[in-house]
Every structure is written in C-alpha cells, then in structure tokens.
C-alpha cells in the first residue's frame, strides 16, 4: 500500500504557539509577520506574528539589537544602497525557524521587513504535492474505470486500485439478486478474485448501512475483531486478529447504491485518519459511478439482446436435402437487424421424429443459435429418407405435429386451396394441402432500422402461423395482406416465397414474388434467368394478385432471393453508380455450380464492396441450391458422414 | 513420434486428394479426406485435429489463393473451395466435440476486420484456441468495429484476436485495435495485412502472431492489459498523418479514380475499344491502386504500395496482360498528386519497380 500524503493544515505558523505575547498597542495585527524600521534603525511597529518570532522587538528598540545578525546585515546593506536600488530578500534562522525576510516599504516611506517562516512554504508545498497526488490518483481511477463497461471488470479495477492506494486488503461487496452477492477481493500487489457468495451483510459492522447508502459509520466505531472471515481475502497474510483498522464506504450508484467497499489495514499504527476516510469516499464515488454505468449498460444490452433474439436472421444449412444459405447486412453498421428478413421452415413430417421436427419448425421460438442447428439436423435425416424415393409417403398431412397453430387442422382439411387451379405448380405439391415442401420466405419492409425490424418480426410470426397454407402461396399472401392492413402499422412489405421439395437429384420449387424483385435462377451453364413470377406488394391494397412460377433446379443450380438493398447499392469505383441487376446477373453467371454458401458470400461481398463506406440499405440474400453431390454429408453437427444414394 | 512422421508422410497423398476435392467442389470427399487424416493419429484427438487443421487444411487454403493469383482458379471457384474448406473445419470440430477440453483458460474473441472476407484463417485460430481449452467467441468475417467493441464490453473477454489479410483494411483495423485497447483489452493482430513480421501491427501498438500456434502460445503466456494511457485516437500512433496526404487521397478517391480512368483511356488507344465490362474492370483496378496508395500513406511505407503494384503486375501477367499497362495509371496519379511529397515518392518508387526490370523497352 502506498499511502497518500496526508494534507497538512496550512497556517500552522508560530502565531498560534505564542499566544502569550499579548499584542501591545503598537503591534499591528497584519496577517503576515512584519516589522517596520525607521531610517535611524529604530523599530516603529511589530506585527503579532513578528512579535512572536522576535520577542524582544518592540517599538523604539534598536532593530540591530532585536534581530539576528543576518537580518541586521541585510538591513544595513539595504540602507546603504539607497532608495532607488531594488532590495533583495534575505534568509536565515530566527530561533529554530528558517525565515525568509522580504523587504518592503510602508506607505509613509518607512522600511519594512516581511518575515515568512519557510516552514509554512514547505507545508504549502507538501500540501500541494499531496493534493496533486490525490487528483492524479482520482484521475487514474476515473480513466481506468471508464475504459470498461463490463461490471466484473470494473469491480476488479476498483479492488485493485483500492488495494494499491488505500489499504492492505480490500473487499467489494456488490449488489446481487437473491441471497448471494458478488464479492471481489484484492490484497496489495495481488490479483483481484471474484466470487458469488451467499453472505449476510449484517455480520460486517457498517456494511448494511453502506449498502443502503446511509452516511458511512466512522472507522473508529468499527471493531476490527468483529470483521467476519469472508470479508478478508484468502491470500491476506495475517488473521482477522491482526487487523488494525477498517473502513466501510458506500459505492454510490446512479440513484441506487452499487455496493460497498471494505478497506482493511493491518496495523493499528497506520489507522485510517479522517482525511483518508474522506478520500476513500471520493474514490468510492468515482468507482460507484463507473460501476452503475456498467450495470446499466449490461442491463440494456441484455434487454436489447432478448428482444432482438427473434428478430435476428436464422442460421441456415441443409434442410431436407436442399442447401439453403442466407446472409444479412443491416443498413446501419451498429445494428444487426433491419427491415429485411428471411426464414426457412422445414416441412413438417409426420413419421420420423415428430417431436424434433415440431421443435425445429418454429425456429424463432428457440434462440437462433440453437434453432438452426437442430433444423438442419432433423432436416438431414428426413432428407436422407426422402431422397430414397419416399417423398410422397413421408409427407402426408403436414400439420399433425404438436406445436402448430391451433385450428390449423380444420382449416386445412376441408379447404382445398382456392388458388390451386390458377397457381402454377400447386398441383405438383400433390392433392391440396399436403406439401413435404420446405417453405422459404425473404422479404423487405419499407423503411429501415429498429421500427422496420419490429415489423419484420410481426410478419415473420404471421407467416409462421400461416404455414398451414404454405401450399397455396396466393392464399397465404392474401391472409398476410389482410393481417397487415388491419394492424396499426402503415408500412408495407414485399416478399418472395419459395416452396421447395427434393425429388431424387432435382429440387422442385414454386416461386412467388409479391412486389419483390423476381428471384434469379443460376443454371449449370452459367445462364441466369429470372423466375417468371410477379405480384402485388403486401399491406397496401385490399386485393392482391400474384403469379407463381414453377422452377426445377438440377444439381448445382441455385435460386437466389434478394432484396433491393443489393441491386440499389450505390458506389463502385466511380462512386455514384448503382450495383444494378445487370451486375448481379454478371456475378451470378460466375457462380454456376457453386455451393449455396459460396453464392451468397460472393454476391454479398461484391455488393458490400461496391457500396464501400457509403450508406446502403439493408441487404438480404437467400440461396436455395440443389446439392451437386448425390450423397448427403453431414457436417452440421448431428450425424456422421452418411452415404446415401 | 513414429505415428507423427508416418502421418506427415502420408499427408502428401491426402494433400492431393483434398486439393482435387476442393477443385471439384466435392464436399464429401474433402470431408472424408480430412477425417482420414485425423483418423491416422493415435492418442490425443484434439492434438490430431489441430495438426490436420494447420498442416492440411491451412496449406490447402493458401494454395487456393496462390492458384487464383496464377489464374488457375476463377474467383468463384476460390469462393467454392473456401466454402468447402470451411465445411471440413466444421466437420473435424464436430467429430472432436466430445474430446474438447472444457474451457478452462479464459475467454477470447476472434474476429475479422470490417470489410475482410477471408474468414478461414480467423476460423482456424478460433478452433485451435478452442482445442486448447479457451472459451472462444468467433465473430466471423467483416465484423463492424461497433459490434466488436460492444462484444468486448459485454463478454468481458480477456483478449481480442483480429485478423486481416488485405492491407487496405489497415486503417479500419487500427480503429478497431485502439478501440479494444481503450476498453482495457489487449489485441493480437494476425494475417498478411499486418506486414512482414507484423510491422504494421507494432505500429498500431498491437501484439502480433504469425500463425495460429503462435497466437495460442502468446495467449497462454498472458498478455499485458492495456492501461488508461491506451485510450487514444489512432492518429496519435502515426504522427505523419498530420500532413493530411492520407486524408486527402481518401476523401477524393472517387475523383482520383475518375480522372485516372479518363487519362488512361486517352493515352491508351486500345482501351477505347474496351467493352463496358472491361472498362469496369479497369476502373476497379484503378480503385484498388488508389486504395493501396492511401494505405501506404497511412502506414507511411512506400514498400506496401510497391509490393501491391508488383503483385498486381504478376496477376495481370498470369492473365496475359503486360504489367506495364499499369504505368499510365501511375503516371496519371503522379500528375494529380504531384504536390504531395509522400504520395509522389510512393508512386515514383512503384513506377520504377515496374519499369526497371525491362529498361530497354519503350511504350
């Protein structure tokens, strides 16, 4: 422990010591000791302070008789120099005091000596040094604490600095939930140790008050022998019995206390003085402010994280023998979410493992990191079965699994999709509602930022609830349109829907665009074509009209869904051009035969680089690729390499 | 040791197998190959996986880059090969999941600089650390600095490992490095962007590791936590930035590219018959040249620019374009930036590197 130099009280000059020398009439009560001498060398007047220093000096006495020789000599020299000369100060001892004598003149022209005890100057210097050291330390405390917004780290820094500068050992008791509290210990020169412990603050004198933010109990009231052992750091050399002095100070937070600091000193000799206790409180004020800022940050981040969890784009992999890859980049670099979204809902399969399939279907229910892995896993096994030609068998009424929207069964059964006739490709899905199709959606809500993201969340939930109708894109979109029109949001959205099913080595898609750029198909030879689909956007008009396209992907071919953030990215080497559909098609032409991940990576990379550091809209991509390999590998974390035909 | 040397020996065959699988976009055989490689080891599975990651997969990835430079692979094939290599890494780590040591060595963040798309090197570092008992947050490619710093605060991680392979990202990397250090977290930089022996990393007051093993060892030794004095604006590390040359080149980049493109077109008759597509590629090349020039000014190292120009010359040559076609672009830039001593010196040095090997020729 390095002790802070104690501020010494200024003004402890001899006046106080020699109050017995009563002021005579001729003594002036000047603040500074001074003595006035006439040209003849006789003392005219003596201030209180000077009288104390020079008890023999009184008006009328000969200056040379009552002052030490060095001052008499200085006076003689000054007189000899005459009035025009610039008089020099002198210094020497008066009794045991070192004194600086500064020459001056009274208003009437008499010679004057100011006598300054240099002990006073020394004490002022000491005081200045100690103030400097204190503010240096406080500044260091602030800058070290402000660096981090992590609560644990702030606790460690506080403990370490306190152990370094204020005490031999430190325990910081934080605010916890329930009965356990986080405690951070540190001994001088050691590392901070952190642990959550179930302790009773009442055991430590002064601690309950400090934790409630009451004025601190003075150190001298706290009996070191009553300090409970859990307060003393494990690596503190010496026992509780050896503790000499204890201080408990509150860590004031913003409004609520952030905890309390317990400072321990080993010996009684170095007990905490009042000034040190005051300083400890200053220290604690800074630490408390930093800690509560960190705590507020942590709470806000947690809240934002929880709320955002369902809005984050899901991670995708292979689902039922079809490769999916999605990529997302929000318009604002600081945000992870925005007005674009995509989702992939694996077909619900009745046989196999319904529990798992159901769990994985509504992926947004479980957290995104956990969800996608499972999606891929269950998809894998189902896909393996399917590719062996059991497609139609595997995909009877898709909605029988648990965890689906209530009432879906009834709606589904009787209602033959009204659009089945018009909707190209609906027929392929087998009679009516049955699908076995994996349903993918990518969309773009007008606007960007958090407000748009909230609406994407609603649309994603609604689409999920409408999954029973996913066999009929027009019906699903009509229902979604009605739902959006009746909500209080004034925003509208564009969507691209894909129902995908693997048949042998090919993947059959039904693709519908609702006011969205038509998905692009990358053929094996590098030809890029737009899916022949178009339709009204959603959430703006009471009636919508869409046309679905049927697309077949041979192995290695990809269908890419994208939002206009890609094509409308402005930039390029010349700084002001749009990326445009032409460049997107050019890029895709080079992506023939690539895995889904590589396609989305390539496109996102080029579009992002095109935009460079300029503002761009949210960008979302979803690639659906028929795997080139006939067998399915399992590198998604669930099954070992399985070779199926 | 005998197992190891036997395996090293047979890696030669596996290397070819993996390469063929990558070229062929054949995920199955790629994964099977790396699994075979791991299976050939007795004993510690984590050590075996680490060895295969670093001695089989990493070299294959390096070869992908070289093959692209030599025009043996298209950019798209490069992406595809990388995607498959990623799958191989995932597969191996997945296999080793039950052998992984419980995290007992603290928490580290591994991320690529914003704008950096080459994620595999960072991924390998992340997996090696995981295999050695670290708790690793792998944030992936192109991590915006805001995300990185927010993650550092919330996670309370002990160290950040920052990867960048392309030097143009150095200014961004510098911002990220100083932001993490200001948060009291030490940074280890890695990747080709940070220069020979990590000289640019040192310039930015970051630690540097040449490879994943070195990074893991550096972390194991313990890094010094930056103090409050680490809170600084990045430009304080680079006093030469006061001359504003970097700032001006960066700010007028689009104009510089436009003018250079116009000059090159005027001086180079063949270009007038270029297709729109070819013109666009030329504009992109010029954009890269100006970008690297700005970076060279940022780190005050003309050699960075010269080596980029000679490297580009090599790339062009591999595609049947004479490297000397870069000279008109350099001349145009030299003309536009003649008043900036550092930029002019940098351009002149690169120009002579291009032209001196063939002193006899004239345009």
Image: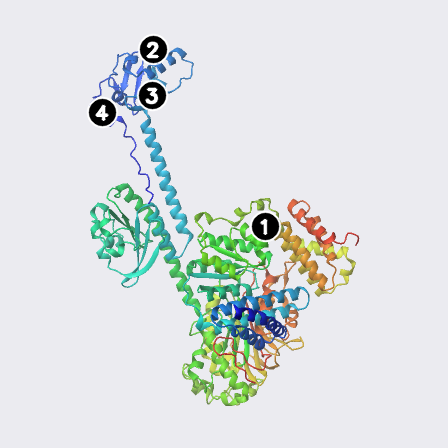
Q: Which of A146 and B5 is in front in this view?
A: B5
The answer to whether tags 1 and 2 share a subunit is no
Instruction: Report the chain holding disc 1.
Output: B
Q: Decide: few, some or many residues near mark 3? Use Cα within 10 Å; few <14, some 14-19, many ≥20.
A: some
Residue A148, percent from left and from top:
41, 54
Q: Mark 2 points at which residue?
A: A39
Q: Mark 4 points at which residue?
A: A18
Q: Tell me the SS state at disc 2.
A: loop
The residue that disc 3 covers is A92
Residue A437 higher or lower than A458, as above or below: below
**Mark 2 surroundings: few (<14), some (14-19) or many (≥20) residues within 10 A:** few
Viewed as shown, does residue A442 lie left or right of A264? right
Number of numbered discs: 4
Give the mark nearest the N terminus, 4 or 2: 4
Q: Residues within 10 Å of mark 1 (few under 14, many from 20)?
A: many
Spatial CA span between label 4 and label 2:
29 Å
The quarter of the displayed image where residue A524 is located: bottom right
Q: Can residue A120 be seen in this view?
A: yes
**Residues flagged by tags 3 and 1 on a common chain:** no
- x%, y% of residue A390? 52, 89
Label 4: chain? A
Q: As rendered, which of A333 and B136 lies closer to the eye?
A: B136
**Which residue of the protein is positioned furthest toward the front in this rendering?**
B2
């Amino acid at each position: 422990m390095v002790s802070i130099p104690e501020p010494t009280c200024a003004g402890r000059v001899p006046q106080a010591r020699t109050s017995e020398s009563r002021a005579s009439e001729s003594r002036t009560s000047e603040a500074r000791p001074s003595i006035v001498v006439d040209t003849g060398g006789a003392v005219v007047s003596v201030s209180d302070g000077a009288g104390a220093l020079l008890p023999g000096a009184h008006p009328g006495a000969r200056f040379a008789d009552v002052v030490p020789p060095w001052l008499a000599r200085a006076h003689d020299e000054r007189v000899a120099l005459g009035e025009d000369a610039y008089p020099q100060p002198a210094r020497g001892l008066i009794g045991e005091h070192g004194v600086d004598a500064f020459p001056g003149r009274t208003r009437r022209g008499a010679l004057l000596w100011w006598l300054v005890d240099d002990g006073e100057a020394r004490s002022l210097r000491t005081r200045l040094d100690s103030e400097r050291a204190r503010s240096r330390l406080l500044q260091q405390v602030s800058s070290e604490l402000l660096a981090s917004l992590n609560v644990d780290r702030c606790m460690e820094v506080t403990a370490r600095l306190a152990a370094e500068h204020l005490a031999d050992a430190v325990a910081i008791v934080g605010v916890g939930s329930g009965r356990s509290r986080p405690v951070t210990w540190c001994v001088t020169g050691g590392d901070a140790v952190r642990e959550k412990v179930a302790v009773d603050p009442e055991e430590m004198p002064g601690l309950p008050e400090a934790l409630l933010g009451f004025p601190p109990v003075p150190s001298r009231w706290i009996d070191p022998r009553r300090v409970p052992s859990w307060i003393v750091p494990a690596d503190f050399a010496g026992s509780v019995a050896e503790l000499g002095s204890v201080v408990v100070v509150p860590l004031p937070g913003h409004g609520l206390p952030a905890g309390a600091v317990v400072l321990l000193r080993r010996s009684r000799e170095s007990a905490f003085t009042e000034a040190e206790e005051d300083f400890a409180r200053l220290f604690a004020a800074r630490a408390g402010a930093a800690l509560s800022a960190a705590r507020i940050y942590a709470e806000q981040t947690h809240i934002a994280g929880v709320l955002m969890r369902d809005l984050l784009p899901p991670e995708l992999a292979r689902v039922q023998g079809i490769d999916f890859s999605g990529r997302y980049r929000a318009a604002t670099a600081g945000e992870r979410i925005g007005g674009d979204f995509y989702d992939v809902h694996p077909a619900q399969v009745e046989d196999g493992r319904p529990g798992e399939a159901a769990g994985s279907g509504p992926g947004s229910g479980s957290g995104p990191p956990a969800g996608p892995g499972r999606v891929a896993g269950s998809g894998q096994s189902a896909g393996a079965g399917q590719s062996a030609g059991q497609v139609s068998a595997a995909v009877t009424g898709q909605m029988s699994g648990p965890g689906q929207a209530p009432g879906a069964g009834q709606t589904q059964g009787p209602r033959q999709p009204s659009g089945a006739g018009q909707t190209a490709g609906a027929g392929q899905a087998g009679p009516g509602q049955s699908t076995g199709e994996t349903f993918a959606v990518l969309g773009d809500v007008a606007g960007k930022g958090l407000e748009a993201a909230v609406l994407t969340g609603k649309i994603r939930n609604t689409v999920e609830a409408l999954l029973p109708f996913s066999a009929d894109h027009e019906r699903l979109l009509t229902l979604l349109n009605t739902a959006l029109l009746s909500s209080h949001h004034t925003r509208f959205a564009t969507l691209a829907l894909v129902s995908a099913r693997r048949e042998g080595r090919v993947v059959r898609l039904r693709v519908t665009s609702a006011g969205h750029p038509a998905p692009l198909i990358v053929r094996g030879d590098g030809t890029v074509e737009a899916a022949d689909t178009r339709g009204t956007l959603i959430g703006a008009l009471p009636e919508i009209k869409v046309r679905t396209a049927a697309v077949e992907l041979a192995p290695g071919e990809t269908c890419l869904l994208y939002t206009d953030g890609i094509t409308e990215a402005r930039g390029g080497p010349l700084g002001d051009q749009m990326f445009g559909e032409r460049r997107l098609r050019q890029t895709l032409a080079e992506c023939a035969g690539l895995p889904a991940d590589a396609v989305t990576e390539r496109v996102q990379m080029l579009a992002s680089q095109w935009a460079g550091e300029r503002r761009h809209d949210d960008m979302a991509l979803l690639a659906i690729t028929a795997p080139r390999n006939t067998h399915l590998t399992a590198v998604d974390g669930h099954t070992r390499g399985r070779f199926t035909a | 040791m005998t197992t190891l040397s036997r395996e090293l020996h047979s890696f030669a065959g596996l290397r070819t197998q993996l390469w063929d699988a990558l070229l062929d976009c054949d995920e199955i055989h790629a994964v099977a190959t790396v699994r075979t490689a791991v299976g050939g080891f007795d004993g510690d599975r984590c050590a075996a996986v680490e060895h295969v990651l670093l001695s089989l997969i990493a070299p294959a990835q390096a070869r992908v880059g070289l093959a692209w430079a030599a025009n043996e692979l298209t950019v798209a094939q490069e992406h595809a090969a990388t995607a498959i290599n990623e799958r191989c890494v995932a597969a191996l780590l997945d296999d080793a999941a039950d052998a992984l040591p419980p995290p007992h060595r603290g928490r580290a963040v591994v991320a690529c600089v914003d704008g950096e798309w080459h994620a595999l090197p960072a991924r390998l570092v992340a997996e090696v650390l995981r295999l050695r008992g670290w708790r690793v947050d792998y944030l992936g490619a192109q991590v915006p600095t805001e995300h990185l710093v927010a993650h550092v605060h919330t996670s309370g991680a002990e160290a950040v490992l920052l990867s960048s392979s392309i030097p143009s990202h150095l200014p961004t990397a510098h911002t990220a490095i100083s932001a993490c250090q200001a948060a009291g977290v030490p940074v280890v930089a890695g990747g080709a962007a940070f220069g020979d022996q990590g000289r640019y990393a040192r310039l930015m007051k970051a630690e540097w590791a040449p490879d994943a093993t070195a990074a893991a060892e550096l972390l194991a030794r313990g890094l010094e936590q930056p103090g409050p004095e680490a809170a600084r604006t990045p430009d304080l590390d680079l006093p030469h930035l006061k001359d504003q040359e970097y700032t001006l080149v960066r700010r007028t980049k689009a104009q510089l590219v436009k003018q250079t493109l116009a000059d090159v077109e005027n001086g180079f008759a063949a270009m007038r018959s270029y297709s729109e597509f070819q013109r666009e590629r030329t504009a992109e090349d010029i954009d890269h040249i100006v970008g690297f020039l700005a970076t060279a000014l940022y780190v005050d190292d003309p050699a960075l620019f010269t080596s980029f120009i000679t490297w580009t010359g090599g790339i062009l040559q591999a595609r049947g374009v004479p490297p000397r076609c870069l000279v008109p672009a350099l001349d145009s830039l030299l003309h536009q930036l003649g008043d900036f001593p550092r930029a002019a010196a940098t351009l002149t040095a690169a120009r002579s590197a291009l032209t001196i090997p063939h002193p006899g020729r004239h345009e």
